[in-house]
Amino acid sequence: MNKLNFLILLLVLPVLLQAQNKDVNYFIQEGVKSNPNIAENINLQQFFQIQNEIITAQNKRPQVNFTGDYLFAPFFFNNGRVISITPNPSPKAYGYDAGITNGGWYAAQVNVAIPLFNKALIKPLYEQNKIQGDISAYGRKQLEQDLKKSIIDQYIITFQFQQQTTYLQKIIDQLETRKPYVTALVKQGLLQQNDYLLLDIQQTTSRNDLLQLQYAYTNGLAILKNLAAISDSTVFNLTDPLIVLQPAPAEFYYVQKFRLDSLNLVAQQNVFNIKYKTQVSAIASSGINAVDITNVPHNVGLSAGLHVAVPIYDGKQKKMNERQNNVLLTNLQAYRNNTALLQQNNIRNAKQQIVQWQQTIGLLDQQIKKQELLQDILKDKVIKGQVTVMDYINALQDYIVTQKTRALAETNVLLYNNQYNYYNW
């Protein structure tokens, strides 16, 4: 065994010993499960649920707080005293007007405010939060669709390297079986020494090509694992990626997305309009509220009332905000129309490419059958010394090129199938 054979064996043997069959769905499931952007989006659904609770707490539950106040407003030179605190200073004393300060203020109160008749006020807040939650959920679908396409594309490319490795190994085995016959013919003088060398060179070249394909497959598998966030060091055997064309949905994703974006603008407008509604709150407080510290024990009490806020005029901000939202809705419609056009173009192009590459595969299959027949004829004639080894090698090289071209064509069909499904949802 030469060094090159030994190197290939070292590369292939661990694969044979450790390889596990995995299909494309395995990588998709692992990728969706481990993707941080998708996990973040899922967590955001909890955020919107909590936001509903916050809206309820802010607009339905009583708001209770404690306040404490102390105001020091002394008078100077009051009735012969340099400084004094009194609600009845002499006319000659210096200080703030006693009617404003009362000489001081001492307060410690518990205050309660309860919103009333505000069902119409908080309904837009709930609706806006729900729409934003729906937008986030639909955003997760887009993240999953993008990740799925990337994983399938990489899977198809990596699978192609695996397929090429398989058929190239068959070529190498075929060359290996021919060498003893060529050796015998050289010894008998029916073939030249250079015929054997040509056969050996071709086999070495094919082995090197096999080694490069093994490198490409290992690297492609590493990229695939990164996309799926898989840390397993096992080398996998990939099963045939059966990418079938999906039927068109009842409604394309982008239609619902733009509908939700439009509803979100309407919801923002409705929330903005809340401040133009009459707001009523019941208020109450209890505690100490005094201006004379000596009378604090007798200034413990309570108060209750209603607070009503009626908006009257704010410079026509409501109409201006509506005009702004109308501009944004117009922009959304333009983007929606453009997205619809691009989607149809992409779907149509994918269909055309699929048909064209399938036709190419059909022609290549015919060519491969003829080349295989030619090889069968030539290898028998080589053994009999009726044709040169170079004729056989040239036919073999043509066959290898055709097989590579077919593998590329088959890969393109799968890639365009995946592209078609990516847009057709």
Image: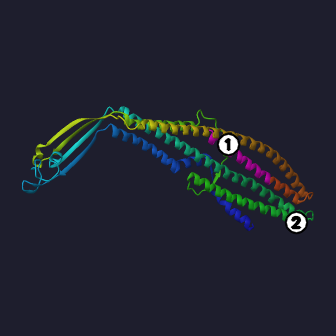
Asked whether the residues under the numbered discs 2 and 1 touch, taking CB atoms below 8 Å apart as contact, a structural biologist would say no
At 73% from the left edge and 59% from the top edge, which residue is drawn? 210
Where residue 7 sits: x, y (%)?
70, 65
Give the amino acid type for the residue marked by disc 2 in the picture: Asn
Residue 194 image label = 2
Per the rendered image, the range of residues in magenta is: 400-425
Q: What is the secondary structure assignment of the residue under circle 1?
A: helix
Quadrant (top left, top right, bottom left, bottom right) of the C terminus = top right
The answer to whether residue 143 is left or right of residue 286 is right
Where residue 344 sits: x, y (%)?
65, 38
Where residue 369 sits: x, y (%)?
82, 47
Viewer-nearest residue: 101 or 164: 101
Q: What residue did someone put label 1 on? A: 417
At 65% from the left edge and 44% from the top edge, which residue is drawn? 419
Q: Is residue 411 magenta?
A: yes
Residue 199 image label = none
Q: Is residue 77 magenta?
A: no
Examine the rendered structure and indicate whether residue 62 appears above or below residue 40.
Answer: above
Task: Report the label total.
Answer: 2
Q: Nearer the viewer, mark 2 or mark 1?
A: 1
Whether residue 334 is visible, yes or no, is yes
At 81% from the left edge and 61% from the top edge, which residue is drawn? 202
Label 2, label 1: how many angstroms apart (C-alpha)?
48 Å
